[in-house]
Image (cartoon, rainbow, N blue to C red):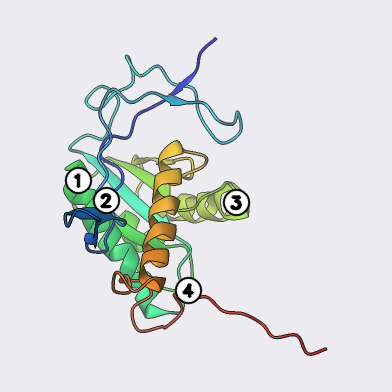
Amino acid sequence: MSLKLLSCNQWVHLQSPVSFLPTAKGSRTEVAPRYFNPPKSIQLKRLSPSLCFPMDQKSVHEGAFGVGQKDGVIIVDHGSRRKESNILLNEFVLMFKSRTGYPIVEPAHMELAEPSIKDAFDLCVQQGANRVIISPFFLFPGRHWHQDIPVLAGAAALEHPGINYLVTAPLGLHELLVDVVKDRIDYCLSHVAGQVEECAVCAGTGRCKFKVQNSEM
């Protein structure tokens, strides 16, 4: 039996500016990070029974079972004591909302920073959501997905009787993540080669360079 993953044709949109490298013929070639918008017809193979979900792309698509006008979406990450890290989630949520067209999308942090899952849940309901979809911005289904986020989501829902909510799967194994990781690697190596500026994440840190530890022996 052939199993497929639902295509995410509006998923990847990287923040850092597009840059170009000169070619031998004098033209310019684009280097990562870049915008990536895979075709709707893309077919992704099932990679792992525990991290990927079999779906029929012909019956599961936007508009049939997807997010509606009365649905609120919460993108939740771990949260950090570092303000700059938390701001990145806000920027991602803005990109996500713009690309998907979903009317109600809120950021949340599981811990260490505000807004909390409860804060985001309240905001969704205040904007008219009668269902809340909580999407963990985590790679794999560890303890936070199995335990912490469901507990926090349940506590937030207690104050809103009658509002259905769902905690979705984390990002898991998805072939598009290969493109994201490759883009980051390529861009950092381009910076090391002096071809592009530091990306927005590394800017000012000086971390994007090769290091070597000298032996003390």
Question: Could you tell me which secondary element the residue under label 4 belongs to?
Answer: loop
Q: Can you say whether 171 is above or below 213 in the image?
A: above
Q: Nearer the viewer, residue 35 or 114?
A: 35
> Which mark, residue 13?
2
Disc 4 target residue: 112
Dot 1 or dot 4, earlier in sequence:
1
Q: Do the residues under discs 2 and 1 have CB atoms within 8 angstroms?
A: yes
Q: Do the residues under discs 3 and 2 have CB atoms within 8 angstroms?
A: no
Q: Residues within 10 Å of mark 3 (few under 14, many from 20)?
A: few
Disc number lying in front (1 or 4): 1
Dot 3 or dot 2, earlier in sequence:
2
Structural distance between the alpha carbons of marks 2 and 1: 8 Å
Disc number lying in front (3 or 1): 1
Structural distance between the alpha carbons of marks 2 and 4: 26 Å
Disc 3 target residue: 147
Amino acid beneath label 4: Leu
Q: Can you say whether 57 is above or below 139 in the image?
A: above
Disc number lying in front (2 or 4): 2
Residue 177 figure quarter = top left
Residue 57 figure quarter = top left
Disc 1 target residue: 99
Dot 2 or dot 4, earlier in sequence:
2
